[in-house]
Image (cartoon, rainbow, N blue to C red):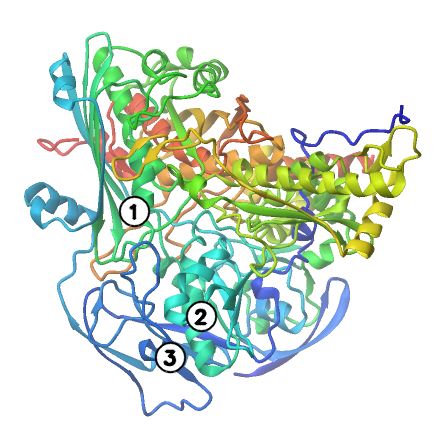
Amino acid sequence: MAKSLPRIRRLVGQPFPRVDADGKARGTTRYLADRHYPGLRHGVVVRSPVPRGILKAVVPDPDFDWTGIVLATAKDIPGINVVHMHDRTMPLLAEIGGEIRYRGEPVGVVAAKTPELAAAAAARVRVEVDELPPLLTLQEAVATFKSAPARFDSMKNQDIVKGDLAHGFAAADEILEAEYWAGHQEQLYLENQGLVVVPQKDGSILAEGSIQCPYFPVHELNDPLKLPPEKIRVRQTPIGGAFGGKEEYPTMLVGYAAVAALKSGRPVKIAYERHEDILFTPKRHPVWSRYKVGFKKDGTLTAIECDFILDGGAYLTISDVVMFRGILHCAVAYRCDHVTIRGKVARTHSVPCGAFRGFGAPQAIWGIESHVDAIAARLGKTPDAYRLQIHARPGDRTPTGQILSKENGATDCLRLALRRADFARKLKQCSRGRLLKGQKKYYGVGLSFFAHGAAFTGDGEAKFKAKGRVELALLDDGRPGVDIRVSSTEMGQGVHTVFTQIAADALDLDPARIRFPLADTALVPNSGPTVASRTTMVVGNVVHRAALDLKSQIEAFAALRHFRGAAARLRGSRLVAQGGKSVPFAKVAREMLAELGGASGFFQFELPADIRWDQTTFKGDSYPGYSWSANVAEIEIDPLTCEIAVKRVCAVLDIGRVVNPVTAAGQVEGGLTQALGYALLEKIGTGPNGLYDAARLQTYIIPTALDVPEFDVKFVEYPYSFAPPGAKGLGELPMDGLAPAIANAVAAAIGVRLRRLPITPEAIHAALHPVSGGAP
Amino acid sequence: MSIVKRTWTVNGTSVAIRAPAGRRLLDLLREDLGLIGSKESCGEGECGACTVIIDDEPVVSCLVPVGQLPDGTDILTIEGIEKKRAGRLLRQAYVECGAVQCGFCIPGMVVGSYALLRKNPRPSAQAIRAGLAGNLCRCTGYAKIIAAVKLAAARLAGRRK
């Protein structure tokens, strides 16, 4: 028997300290703005001054001194003027003679020695447009949908059909119908969008910056830049928050900067200031949904019919997939045999909407979770008892026909949240529009319950086959260790930390010997974008398996080299074998680096072979796994000012295996806070001039430390056994359901249900004091 | 624009300044003095990412023109905070409590926390919320930041006894 060695403590499941926190807290971490680029030019985007029209001319002012300044327009685009995205309809820069579709649509890029000079020059470019009448808002689009559906301009339609809706409604004792609205939401990462494109001698480009998905520009800009993927190299700088906001948009920014960089032959940096960032980058899609639900006297749901329309803005970009995720979350959490959901993406002449944490799910869950509460009220049932009665359980079929697996903590989440929040007792204290004895403020408690489909929709992961490597390397201290090579980006969510834990456990190696460099497409295989709550679940499994692959290579080498062929094991950072003296990992790793030139473990993700998905009919297994959550919100409303204070929030979540309870709780608290902002504070819309009407931090209000409640966050673990260590999605789930929980609490406090987000004090006031004759 | 010449103390060291009077303190710190820990996010004094301490008061450096600060002004940035015991305790507590995510607001947040603890060494949770209300964070929901300030305050008080 080998001598017993101290085993490295198992790290998965532990509150392992963040590997990137120290430099960030010292202020030494270098974000894009903290880096120096020799010969740099600063780029400023020239934009359309009107929301819609035909572009006639882009004319630099001849009275301005253009010496040393470059103006790139559509005619400077080396290849075909289109950004791939999902339908290849959006030009990189608007063409003369082409249609302008939103105010601020890029028509050119100015590059100059200083940001001030570039801004001054951009202001001296005359953009001539023959104006056309725009359709600016979802309200207008929905009005058309209702009054003249044939004229409704939908960029994408998708239905989900289960059973027979007519049959379901015929079986109902009662039918409840209502509409739910929510507006835009800005991601408001603290670090604004920014990146640098450096032209290389061989005609290729290097893009570096605050980029959530480094492989997107590599595969989306081949047509306009006339460069194959291998000639577009993208590197991540430390990202000061993204939340989806730096998912698809940086691709366009790389394109703008690249056109100017290729024309000038110099590195070009485009870094937005806050105002420009809010005005012209994608937001969460506004939504209108209409639920019509049939139910029996005992509460059984017999039919769910839902129209679900997102405001896509001027171009589709990625809105089809956002809508897909939306409709897949419209009715997934409840038992019902007859379901029809019709999703659409409305075209408006506004900035294209895009990815934001939740990706359609918060919009869907906002509607259904309000509506289920309304049905419970109609039935005279409590919100908690009613959800316990009708929620989906293992073995149930979802609207797409997927059978929910046993790895499902839905019921636990619901029961535990209700118990921890003491919901049943608190429900009796709700004011319902009349202050109870001892109350100075209206009090309400609200519940929501929901799932989030983890990873890419449908067979996305099966087709994508995420790849990753774990390889031997000399680390910064000159001693051997391993590098994690995947394209997942650290944006604050903690992936560098949890992947370090996963790799350390798989290798049984000191975590200090594991390094996770920032993603660089020249050095990492494509493990997919850092989106869709897929990273720990899917890429975490890739890292786990690649690390095991490397481990077996190290063990095989050590067996021959040090143990005369006897089976060796890497254990506690040492190689051990029966009858032999253990050898340190560092020694074996040095030998492998010197003699073999290194070693690399590899894995490519695959889904179970029995996954079935039909992308045209939307039938089958819509997600590899589901995370679940229940939220309880307690609120108070001042009867005089109508101010709403969220006092306590309890969230219980099943995210599968919790790799790091501290980073996971941090994700939850942060997501809940964004959802609180969505529910109550964050109000922004397209104004009559085509611009967002809250374009700075003075007017776009996000939660401060004074606005957040006490959080009670608890996990129940139903691991995804197919993909060790067994995580399911985490990132988006906390954003999904707090808004309806708060809205349900508001209804319990004032006795009126509000169906439009955000719920502002003005809306509360209008509900409490309806103009006589007007509807609340 | 008129050029001003000043002598300040920055992070404990005397520094001679020559700059346009209207230059933002934030730009001067970052570009001329290389103190990149102070971050710009909103550029209009709403977010607190550029918070520094001027003569014992937390100030958003994006709104301070250089000409406004007389000779002898004492400026403390995140880089100087690290030289103070309370600053190091705060940094350690932020790391231990999981209060750091994307990190972009954190230097300003730590500077704000330092200023808070100077005035109120044992702040309640509500005092911490109020003290940091001018520092926006989009990642954390503030819970772990509040916990970190409490932990640092407790350690600071423990040693002082």
3 vs 1, front mark: 1
Residue at image point 38% right, 76% down: A78
Q: Which mark is residue A320?
A: 1
Q: Where, quadrant-wise, is the C terminus of chain A in this rendering?
A: top left
Q: Give the Cα distance between marks 3 and 1.
A: 31 Å
* Cα gap from disc 1 to disc 2, whole angstroms: 27 Å
Q: Is residue B68 above or below residue A710?
A: below
Alpha carbon separation for disc pair 2 and 3: 18 Å
Q: Residue under label 2, please give it.
A: A227
* Residue at position x 66%, y 47% in the image: A21
Between circles 1 and 2, the one closer to the viewer is: 2
Q: Residue furthest front?
A: A565
Q: Secondary structure at mark 1?
A: helix
- Label 3 sits on residue: A72
Q: Given the image, what chain letter belongs to the residue carrying mark 3? A: A
- Going by the numbered disc 2, the residue's amino acid type is Leu
Q: Chain of mark 2?
A: A
Whether residue A111 is visible here, answered yes or no, is yes
